[in-house]
Image (cartoon, coloured by chain):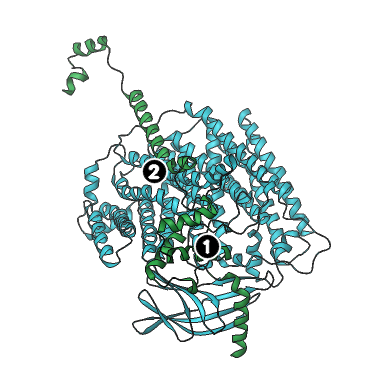
Chain colours: A cyan, B green
């Protein structure tokens, strides 16, 4: 019964979503307040119903109801509870349901936190959101029904792919979807603004918090996914330029550009048309990503099953929404008023340059991802576009962008002074050059790593020196400086932290070039060198887990004759699917990590082992956390706090200059 | 303990399909040659996997390709010759870095085209805005009025 209730709730949610799409829209056209007010309760109810459906599917997984095809194919009665819960989204149907759950959550959030918005804008926004919901709910109901029953029910399920039985899966997709789908809010805002024809700084003030919210979630989601790949796949790779990964990177880059251009729009009323375009683009790329992942156009290491006939449906949704939004844009963008003016050398100018470089990166990733598909479709010729391509073309854009980031941060709005900005970066340049020399002397080749690491250090110092200088600019003493430091607007901290986080990530990426690898065959008692450490194989043994058996090795990590850590790389065997996965043994020492994975065991008692020392590698993910923290600071800034927009717009007290 | 070891051997045997990428037994004796082989292998695609290099992949075919590659290098082939040897057998699809050729011109040119197109659009927008924003020049009548008031025209004042 519970399962059928869930199925029915999903159908009801679809009908409500249609109502949410049509009624408020008509109300906005007719100027009927009562019709427009339908948007709010339908959006909230739609979310509750989808949540109910999601809860019903989760229930079926938790109690191992093997009369459901979805549960049979992805669960097993002996699977630990956490993976029964997270396994709900570890398959096509469930992950689409999660997608729609997040989409309807976004609609509910708009409904709850938009009381300060003009009634028409709000009605149109929720109407677009409703239309999106209706399209994807229909997709689920027609092609990907998670509630399909089977009779007779088997007595046991086929279990979840072991690679997905990991805490990483419990966190990665929900975060990723919050980001991915979170951009739908800004998309709906943009479409509503185009429909209404009114776009001003107030619009940017409504849209920017949601952009930041989506961006923060996506940043964390991508970082989480990359760390998951790093420790799961057994050789320490964390990014493969796989189309499935690019699917999340494309909206992230567009979203990063959007966060910046929305700042210009909000502060200076400039770049309006461009900001609207980016708002459409970010979510369009999310849709494109969903299409790539869910349609079966590609199959990849991300082991979700796909079905080609679903592809056509998603493609239709994709064409309808992207095409519709772009058509609306083409129709209305010309009529938008030109915004504030600025000199080329100014904060706005720098942000325009930032947007140019970011969109170039984004276009490159999009083309690199789609090119092989297009070429094969047109000529039948198969080519591969892999990591070497992306690294070759993106590094020459990304490094100059990193060099420019602190400079832009130092420029004033409207008209900036380049030489003064450069002078304020003296310390950062100095430290960067010192870092160049130090990295060169200490670690040396590859030189790309040396250069990138030096740029990264400059970026971190440059980002933070803005904070330091603002505090000390006219400081009379330490107390006054501290007071000023603490009194800085949160958005200034946001910029500094986000940029510094990018620098830390870049440093971690650069340092991968200095990693040490030792692939060898070991016996118990052997010690081998791995970078500054010695790793010894102490013991090999076996044990049983809840739904697997594993053979593991105990390895000692020694530094200067002292054992500093023990790691236990293992190989697990999951009998339900007759598949195996490796568990890397990882220990964090300082900012670096020692990483060990087991290979084949030989008859003579020896075993193959892959041992790595990865200096500074944790910075890749620490940097992402710091970036997200920067986003959170900006989100918390009073100016942007959700719901204060109306108060802020009221004729205000004279504001202190930043 | 011996029982544990037996289970270990059994699990390891069952799990052996998941052995990882380059195995110690595959390595070339000469470290310089081995390093070259690794560098080349990291840019060759494992044909039966999605987007993994043969250096990262544990598929049997990837292993065969690694052996083939190393055999060429041991025989004294240059990096280019060794790579071409593989490409001759498996086609351009095996290259993770697509070759420059007419079909890939748009691909390799993508960043430049995007950058140039974007810069051009920016320049055009900037020019347009400057023209739109420039204040209209004063008419002769307005100048005369200003002179009558004893104010010099903006053009003269700027001097």
The residue sitting at 37% across, 39% down in the picture is A352
The residue sitting at 56% across, 62% down in the picture is A171
Quadrant in the picture for residue A515: bottom left
SS class of the residue under badge 2?
Answer: helix
Residue A598, placed above or below residue A493: below
Q: Nearer the viewer, mark 1 or mark 2?
A: 1
Badge 1 density bin: few <14, some 14–19, many ≥20, Cα 10 Å: some
Residue A383, image x and y in percent? 53, 48
| A389, A501: nearer the viewer | A389
Residue A535, image x and y in percent? 42, 80
| A372, B80: nearer the viewer | B80
Q: Chain of mark 2?
A: A
The reply, left or right, for residue A12 in relation to residue B152 is right
Residue labelled with disc 1: B65
Query: Is circle 1 on the same chain as circle 2?
Result: no
| A281, A120: nearer the viewer | A281
| A444, A406: nearer the viewer | A444
Quadrant in the picture for residue A92: bottom right
The reply, left or right, for residue B53 in relation to residue A292 is left
Residue A546, image x and y in percent? 65, 76
Q: Which residue is most to the right?
A: A152
The disc placed on residue A538 is none
Q: Which residue is most to the left?
A: B159
Residue A335, placed above or below residue A237: above
Residue A527, placed above or below residue A452: below
Residue A217 visible within the image: no
Distance CA(mark 1)–CA(mark 2): 38 Å
Residue labelled with disc 2: A357
The reply, left or right, for residue A166 in relation to residue A93 is left
């Amino acid at each position: 019964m519970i399962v059928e209730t869930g199925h029915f709730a999903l159908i009801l949610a679809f009908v409500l979503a249609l109502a949410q799409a049509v009624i408020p829209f008509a109300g906005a056209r007719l100027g009927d307040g009562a019709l427009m007010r339908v948007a709010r309760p339908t959006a909230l109810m739609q979310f509750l119903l989808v949540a109910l459906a999601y809860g019903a599917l989760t229930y079926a997984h938790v109690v191992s109801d093997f009369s459901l095809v979805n549960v049979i194919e992805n669960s097993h009665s002996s699977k630990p509870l956490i993976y029964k819960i997270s396994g709900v989204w570890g398959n096509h149907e469930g992950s689409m349901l999660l997608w729609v759950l997040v989409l309807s959550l976004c609609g509910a959030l708009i409904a709850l936190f938009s009381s300060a918005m003009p009634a028409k804008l709000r009605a149109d926004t929720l109407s677009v959101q409703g239309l999106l919901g209706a399209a994807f709910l229909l997709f689920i109901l027609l092609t990907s029904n998670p509630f399909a029953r089977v009779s007779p029910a088997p007595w046991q399920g086929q279990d979840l792919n072991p690679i997905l039985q990991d805490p990483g899966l419990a966190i990665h997709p929900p975060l990723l979807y919050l980001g991915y789908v979170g951009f739908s809010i800004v998309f709906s805002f943009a479409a509503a603004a185009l429909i209404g024809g009114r776009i001003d700084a107030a619009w940017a003030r409504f849209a920017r918090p949601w952009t930041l919210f989506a961006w923060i979630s996506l940043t964390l989601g991508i970082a989480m996914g990359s760390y998951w790949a790093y420790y799961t796949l057994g050789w320490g790779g964390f990014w493969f330029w796989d189309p499935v990964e690019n699917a999340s990177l494309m909206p992230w880059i567009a979203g990063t550009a959007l966060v910046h251009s929305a700042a210009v729009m909000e502060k200076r009323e400039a770049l309006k048309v461009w900001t609207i375009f980016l708002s459409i683009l970010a979510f369009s790329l999310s849709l494109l990503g969903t299409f790539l992942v869910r349609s079966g156009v590609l199959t990849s290491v991300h082991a979700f099953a796909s079905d080609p006939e679903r592809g056509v449906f998603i493609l239709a949704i994709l064409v309808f929404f992207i095409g519709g939004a772009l058509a609306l844009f083409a129709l209305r963008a010309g009529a938008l008023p030109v915004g504030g003016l600025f000199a080329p050398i100014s904060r706005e100018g720098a942000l325009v340059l930032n947007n140019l470089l970011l969109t170039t990166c984004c276009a490159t990733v999009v083309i690199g991802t789609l090119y092989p598909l297009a070429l094969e479709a047109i000529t039948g010729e198969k080519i591969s576009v892999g990591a070497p391509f992306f690294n070759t073309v993106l590094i020459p854009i990304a490094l100059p962008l990193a060099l420019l980031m602190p400079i832009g941060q130092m420029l004033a709005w409207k008209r900036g002074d380049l030489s003064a900005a450069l002078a304020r970066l003296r310390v950062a340049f100095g430290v960067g050059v010192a870092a160049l020399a130090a990295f060169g002397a200490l670690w040396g080749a590859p030189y790309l790593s040396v250069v990138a690491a030096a740029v990264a250090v400059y970026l971190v110092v440059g980002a933070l020196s803005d904070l330091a200088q603002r505090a000390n600019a006219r400081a009379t003493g330490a107390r006054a400086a501290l007071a000023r430091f603490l009194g800085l607007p949160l958005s200034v901290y946001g910029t500094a932290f986000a940029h510094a986080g990018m620098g830390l990530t870049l440093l971690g990426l650069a340092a991968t070039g200095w990693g040490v690898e030792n692939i060898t065959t070991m016996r118990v008692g052997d010690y081998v060198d791995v970078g500054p450490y010695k790793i010894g194989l102490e013991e090999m043994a076996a044990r049983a887990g809840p739904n697997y058996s594993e053979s593991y090795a105990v390895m000692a990590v020694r530094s200067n004759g002292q054992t500093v850590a023990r790691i236990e790389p293992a190989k697990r065997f999951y009998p339900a699917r007759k598949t195996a996965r490796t568990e890397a043994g990882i220990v964090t020492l300082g900012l670096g990590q020692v990483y060990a994975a087991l290979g084949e065991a030989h008859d003579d008692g020896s075993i193959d082992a892959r041992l790595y020392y990865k200096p500074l590698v944790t910075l890749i993910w620490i940097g992402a956390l710091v970036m997200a923290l920067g986003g959170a600071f900006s989100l918390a800034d009073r100016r942007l706090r959700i719901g204060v927009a109306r108060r802020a717009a009221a004729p205000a007290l004279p504001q202190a200059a930043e | 303990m011996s029982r544990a070891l037996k289970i270990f051997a059994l699990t390891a045997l069952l799990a052996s399909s998941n052995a990882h990428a380059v195995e110690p037994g595959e390595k070339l004796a000469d470290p310089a040659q081995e390093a070259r082989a690794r560098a080349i292998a990291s840019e060759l695609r494992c044909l039966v996997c999605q987007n993994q290099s043969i250096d990262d992949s544990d598929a049997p075919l990837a292993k065969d390709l690694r052996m083939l590659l190393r055999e060429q290098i041991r025989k004294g082939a240059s990096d280019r010759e060794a790579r071409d040897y593989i490409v001759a057998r498996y086609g351009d699809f095996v290259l993770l870095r697509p070759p420059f050729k007419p079909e890939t011109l748009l691909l390799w040119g993508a960043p430049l085209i995007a950058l140039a197109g974007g810069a051009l659009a920016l320049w055009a927008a900037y020019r347009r805005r400057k023209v739109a924003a420039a204040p209209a020049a004063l008419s002769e009548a307005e100048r005369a009025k200003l002179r009558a008031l004893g104010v010099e025209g903006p053009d003269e004042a700027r001097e």
